[in-house]
Image: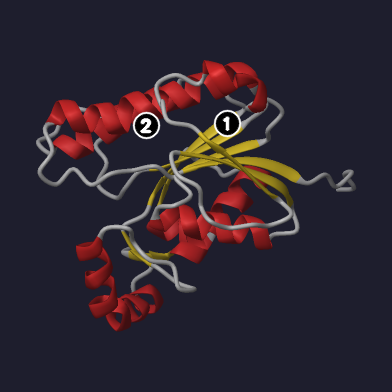
Amino acid sequence: MNRVHQGMKVILFGATGMVGQGVLRECLLDADVESVLVVGRSPTGQTHAKLREIVHNDFLDFSGIESELAGFDACFFCLGVSSVGMSEERYRHLTYDITLAAAKTLAKLNPRMVFIYVTGAGTDSSERGRSMWARVKGKTENDLLKLPFKAAYMFRPAGIQPLHGIRSKTAWVQAGYVVAAPLLSLLNRIAPKYVTTTEQVGRAMIRVARDGFPKPVLESEDINRV
């Protein structure tokens, strides 16, 4: 297949989180990615020839920066919060409302875009299960899949091992990763269903955005296989 090779232009949300840091690293390293626009509330603190950043505070309203959000091939949406100690209303706002506000804006501006959303293992597509976070994530996934993108994919990693010095911003989560690191790297080798790495997630996103995938939802095992 001889196609003219053109680099991918990527928008990344959540670049300062653990998954987002890993995805940003792989995008900057990958020759297939021409440029990365990071949209976030705080700067990443990184400089790179491929990287541009917009610091934006209102994640429910992107009208002020719409002109800068057009002309992209892919969006990697890695924003996420833990539901621990959170009401359903608040979690839904931070998970569903913000994701859909960004996605609807991007779908309108970039009909040829591939949108990839990081959710989590155990997400409830029926939206009716017992687990609050799984219902909210399920609704988020379902509504993203209805938007008029070229394609949308839901990544559902289970455990994620941070590599290359990437850290979680949440102190107790980071402490847990430090303790669990030897176990995670063992599990990644022997039980790919349950563990992936920040590097594998980032590389899989780029590959799926470029080449597609047979189904819209990828579990940890699919992510590792890609």
Query: Which quadrant is home to the C terminus?
Result: bottom right
Look at the numbered disc 2 and give the secondary structure of its residue: helix
With 121 as the anchor, is 218 left or right in this view? right
State the image coordinates of residue 223 (x, y, percent, origin top left): 47, 56
Tell me what residue is drawn at x 31 percent, y 83 percent. Answer: 182
Residue at 62% in and 37% down:
74
Q: Residue at x 41, y 27 (%)?
A: 59
Q: In x, y percent, where is residue 34? A: 75, 48
N-term mark: 2 or 1: 2
Q: Amino acid at mark 1?
A: Ala
In the image, taking residue 88 as reference, residue 81 lies left or right, namely right
Residue 198: where, in percent of width, then height? 45, 63
Q: Nearer the viewer, residue 155 or 60?
A: 60
Residue 138 seen in the current view: no
Residue 201 visible to the viewer: yes
Mark 2 to mark 1 CA distance (whole Å): 13 Å
Residue identifier under label 1:
151
Which residue is the site of mark 2?
141
Crowding around mark 2 (Cα neighbors within 10 Å: few <14, some 14 to 19, many 20+) is: many
Mark 2 and mark 1 residues within 8 Å of each other at the beta carbon: no
